[in-house]
Image: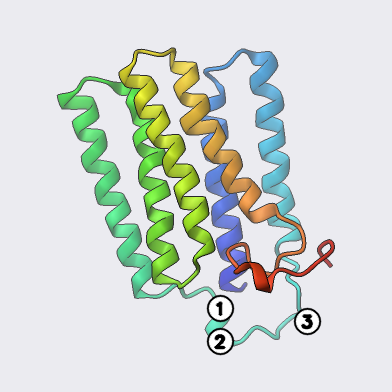
Amino acid sequence: MTKDQTGRIIGAAFGLVFVQANAGSLPTAVAMPLRLLSLAAFLWVTVLGRRGSGVAGTATPASRTRFGRSYWYVVAAEVLGLVAGLVVIARVLHAPQAAVGWIALVVGVHFSGLAVAWRRPALHVLGASIAACGAAGLALAALGAPVAAGRTVAGILPGFLLLASVLRPGREDPAAPVERVRSGTPA
């Protein structure tokens, strides 16, 4: 499996988790379709994404699933940021409703780190979008908005942003610059 295929599956998995974990705060009539849609998108990526766009066995050793040292530095910073922020939110601020917003904010910043580490500027857009959802979720929590509002903005919306980023048809690479985007539908 190539790094691109693995990245798509990881992105889809986290998108699925964001939606599944946060849809429970919504009424069942709304939550179920969202959960089913996210599951269908995940399955689409895992089943069809494994096909790849080239001939089987032609992936170069460089395109295999090794992400490199810079990737692990970004992930380590993300984990530290998540843990530190969640501890402060739970033990100092006593505001568990802000946790989803913090998670989305850190995940969004993590994509900006990956954009730099992998020289993929398109990931800045995804990162900024998810971080904005997280910041909005934190603001909603600070303003005392209903938990469902915060989870929708900072949990469900980022989940679908992640899923959409790996589902876009006609792309060989979900983070490819615009000039590398093929026209048409996936092969």
Looking at numbered disc 1 in the image, what kind of residue is underneath it?
Answer: Arg
- Asked whether the residues under the numbered discs 1 and 3 touch, taking CB atoms below 8 Å apart as contact, a structural biologist would say no
Q: From the image, tell me which residue sits under label 3.
A: 55
Q: From the image, tell me which residue sits under label 1.
A: 64
Farthest front residue in view: 179
Quadrant of residue 16 within the rendered picture: top right
Q: Position of residue 120 (x, y in %)?
A: 50, 69
Q: Position of residue 14 (x, y in %)?
A: 52, 46
Calculate the distance from the C-alpha at mark 1 to the C-alpha at mark 2. 5 Å
Secondary structure under tag 3 reads loop
Quadrant of residue 183 within the rendered picture: bottom right
- Asked whether the residues under the numbered discs 1 and 2 touch, taking CB atoms below 8 Å apart as contact, a structural biologist would say yes
Q: Position of residue 102 (x, y in %)?
A: 34, 36
Q: Residue at x 57, y 16 (%)?
A: 26
Calculate the distance from the C-alpha at mark 1 to the C-alpha at mark 3. 14 Å
Q: Which mark is residue 61?
A: 2
**Vertical placement of residue 159 versus 144, above or below:** below
Q: Earlier in the sequence, mark 3 or mark 2?
A: 3
